[in-house]
Image: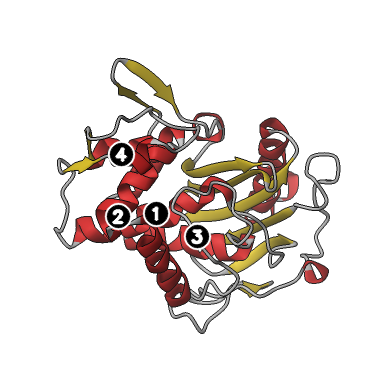
Amino acid sequence: MPGSKRWVRGAGIAGLLLACLAVGSASAHHRPHPRLHTLTDPNLDAALVVDAATGRVLYARNDDAVRHPASLTKMMTLYLLFEKLRAHKLAMNTEIPVSLYAASQPRAHLKLRPDETIPVETAIKAVTVCSANDAAVAIAEAVGGSEPVFAEMMNAKARTFGMTHTYYENASGLPDDSQVTTAGDLSILAWHLIYDFPEYFPYFRTASMSWHGRDYYNHDVLIDNYPGVDGIKTGYIDTSGYNVVTTVQRGPTRLIAVVMGGVTPERRDRVMVNLLDAAFEELNPPRPGGG
């Protein structure tokens, strides 16, 4: 995905045209779209739907507006971990040590204890299923040595991808005024997770996990309730509202969609469903006569 290219609006193009999305809300797609004003916070709202195979933007609203990513941050945390796995510098059964700092992270968490260890694979599931902040920091320390160094790695990777509106201060998405992104940048990161790591991407649709006798279930209810959804991440802090990045595969068509600023998880998900329904209708319009 060359960083100099951009998603393309309107008519599709041959091949994958990906990278830095710098399109404003004033240029949102002309097609009538679901009303969002009662479902999202106007100060936090953003939405984007992209055909992953062509780069065609099917819907955009505030997609270059700077927002706080909340736990969508963990998408990049896992990307950097997947790189280490691909390079055989870590393995799924590698035991990650848990520092006092990692164990001190607030909810959501697994209540990891200082000086215990957690297998890499379990840490991945902890992040994708229950968005565990302590597991995310443990990953950051295992990959980068410390969370500040890991944040520098995150920012370097974001620059490589052309995510020009994104800046990271931590690996978890816990509140930090400086930690920002856009819907457009998140769609770029989602694309890389899907296509750079097809062997690891299925972890984003993990339904549940267990740790120390307790069961945890995925926060992303769209995975089991919208046909074709195979991930990837939800997120919430007070200053971001309820966010979600979703990917849907139906036949040869894959969509990447982002909704930010939902007033509640249910309203956020309703916006996402409406946008996906409209996108698939545009890509596959009903034939005359219903045939």
Q: Earlier in the sequence, mark 3 or mark 4?
A: 4
Residue drawn at 71 percent across, 49 percent down: 278
Report crowding for label 3: few under 14, some 14 to 19, many 20 or more residues within 10 A (C-alpha).
many
Quarter holding the N terminus is bottom left
Above-or-below relation of 108 to 48: above
Label whose residue precedes the other's in the sequence (3 or 1): 1
Q: Is residue 93 placed above or below 9 in the rendered structure?
A: above
Q: Which mark is residue 81?
A: 2
Q: Compared with residue 141, is residue 62 higher up or lower down, i.e. above or below?
A: below
Q: Amino acid at mark 4?
A: Ala
Q: Are marks 4 and 2 in contact (CB under 8 Å)?
A: yes
- Provide residue 226's location: percent of width, then percent of height: 56, 35
Query: Tag 4: Cα neighbours inside 10 Å, few (<14), some, or many (≥20)?
Result: many
The reply to whether callout 3 and callout 4 are in contact (CB within 8 Å) is no
Helix, strand or loop status at disc 1: helix
Q: Which residue is mark 4?
A: 123
